[in-house]
Amino acid sequence: MRWSNAFIPTLREDPADAEAVSHRLLVRAGYVRQLMSGVYSLLPLGFRVVAKISGILREEMDRIGAQEFRLPALHPAALWQRSGRWEHMGEEMFRLQDRKGADVGLGMTHEEVFANLAAELRSYKQLPQIWYQIQTKFRDEPRPKSGVLRVREFTMKDSYSLDVDEQGLDAAFTRHFEAYRRIFSRCGVEALAVEASSGAMGGNESIEFMVRSDAGEDDVASCEACGYAANVEKATSSLVAVEDEAGPEAPEKFATPGVHSIDELAAFEAGAVPTRQLKSLVYVLDGEVRLLVLRGDHPLSEQKLLDGTGAREARPASEEEIRAALGAGAGSLGAVGVSAIPVYADLALQGRSNLFTGANEDGFHLRGVDLTRDVEVEKWLDLREVSAGAPCPLCDAPLRVERAIEVGHIFKLGTRYSEVFGAEVLDETSAKRPIVMGSYGIGLERAMAAIVERCHDENGIVWPVAVAPYEVVISVVKPKDVESLEAANSLYESLVAEGVEVLLDDRNERPGVKFKDADLIGIPYRVTVGPRGLAEGKLEWKARRGGESRDLDLHKAAGSIVETVLEERSRSL
RNA sequence: CGGGCCGUAGCGCAGCCUGGUUAGCGCGCCUGACUGGGGGUCAGGAGGUCGGGAGUUCAAAUCUCCCCGGCCCGACCA
């Protein structure tokens, strides 16, 4: 491609509304443009990067024996009503009506459509199967953000495994796990595989692939010592045995005027450090009021609460609901003697005694509380969100907690969809068995943005060769110089003939502009052709990453460039 | 859905509070010249429903109301 004919609208300044690095750079370097909130156009450069990622995805899906489909984006309501997700997905699903007034939804994911097709499978002999597609998904996100990281319309590679039994699913899951490792490694980013909550997808096991970045929306706990890694929605820490000093025979009430928080009670002279306090939270789970108790310094993880109770919705109780349930306001709540509403306590509190908590009377607290003796705990649950430094559940080393972008997610779905859609096969004994499914996704534009988050410097993007829109850019310092232009053209032709992806910067621009643009758009290698070098029969070869450069002999340049590029390509296979 | 903020040329912004010539600036763009190894210089030029509508006023980018769109924080989110 000749730059003079290309549409690469680079901007000299950062776009005003871009915060995240990937957002800023992808817009500024001319890869994407916003059409409306959460909806982006991929410009030629962006499209080429996504096409590179798609290529890697197809190769790795092929490698595990997957077959590519192309499924509709337009789905009849009836399909989603069968799985119950027409209602369940709520406002996140884009909905419309056709001319006959029939309800139609835009596909957010394709479990339903694939399960519906899988109903044509008859025999275990036809299994296992892995089906996939690379297609546009629509989700009416409440808050699109960070450029192309969280959007309402995006491309996803979604695959689905179909097996007769759990062992088959385990095998398909493992194959995907390995394929995903290869995919992200080939894309040039380190993706951490972490245990995750399955959330609304159902199923019993899921692993997320996370790329560390401040622009991410998830927190990941990881242990350098043993390799444990989990989304904080799922992560636990080991329980440290605590020796509480002997307390009184029974809880003692004492006045705590003006004390309404853990911190205030810690600062109160008759108070106690947060680790000796109980945090009491009133929550409404699917309409039922519950009292949750955690250690004073432990934050509640709402996702764990949902996962642990099986509730679909959790919200903090209102001031009125709290008063109705416990007779006091938030800030003076406690679980001692509470029997009207069930108490769920965090596992970290088991066996603790001599603790401080609210007295369910405004302005009063209790000390000397013994969980076992004084509180009627209905369920002990893992409710706390782990924080940095907490001991690893496997080896007790301190955990790290970091922001990360979820670039891939693999799920064991089970038979939820196959049962509903009648996707059943006969096994060896002629018994009908629902197909056991798995579901595996990767967001392409998000992956592109995650790569940029990891691969950039102050001058712009620094693409890994495997996903770069072009592998080499030839910058012609003085295009009006006939000798320069001829040398550049002939190099360009030779490289193109060898299958190298080259961008020839033949624009009538100052060299500084060309260098800045080349750095900005992040092409891995740059060849500079100018009178100064040509006078000595040389071209300059420069790597974007690291910046090292060397002179190439004009007549041997093409060969050595081809060699380098091919070597770099093979490295990511 | 709650809170904060923004919409003026392709991009980045000023002007608005305190209404009043022809709405400015930088970058980019077009023409020409000089130039050419990290966003060059000079000369000339094009480009605006001031997000939309209604209102107040002799007069609205500026004041008022309604609407639309966008960004950030939170809630939410396979």
Image: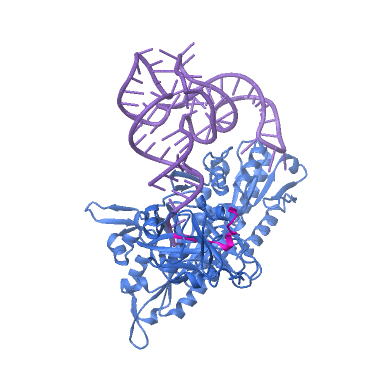
Chain colours: A blue, B purple
Q: Position of residue A433 (x, y in %)?
A: 35, 80
Q: Residue furthest left?
A: A100
Left or right: A469 in relation to A280: right
Q: Position of residue B73 (x, y in %)?
A: 51, 47
Location of residue A283 by image quarter: bottom left
- Residue A358 magenta-drawn? no
Left or right: B35 in relation to A120: right
Vertical order, A158 against A460 (above or below): below
| Residue that appears at 72% across and 54% down | A556
Residue stretch in magenta: A267-281
Q: Quadrant of the C terminus of chain A?
A: bottom right
Q: Position of residue A260 (x, y in %)?
A: 50, 52
Residue A205 in sight from this viewpoint:
no
Vertical order, A557 against A251 (above or below): above
Residue A430 in sight from this viewpoint:
yes
Q: Nearer the viewer, residue A467 or A95?
A: A95
- Residue A277 magenta-drawn? yes
Vertical order, A34 against A172 (above or below): above
* Total residue callouts: 0
Q: Nearer the viewer, residue A376 or A148?
A: A376
Q: Nearer the viewer, residue A104 or A259?
A: A259
Q: Residue furthest bottom?
A: A429
| Residue that appears at 56% across and 54% down | A263
Q: Nearer the viewer, residue B3 or A250?
A: A250
Q: Residue furthest right?
A: A536
Location of residue A434 by image quarter: bottom left
Q: Position of residue A236 (x, y in %)?
A: 55, 68
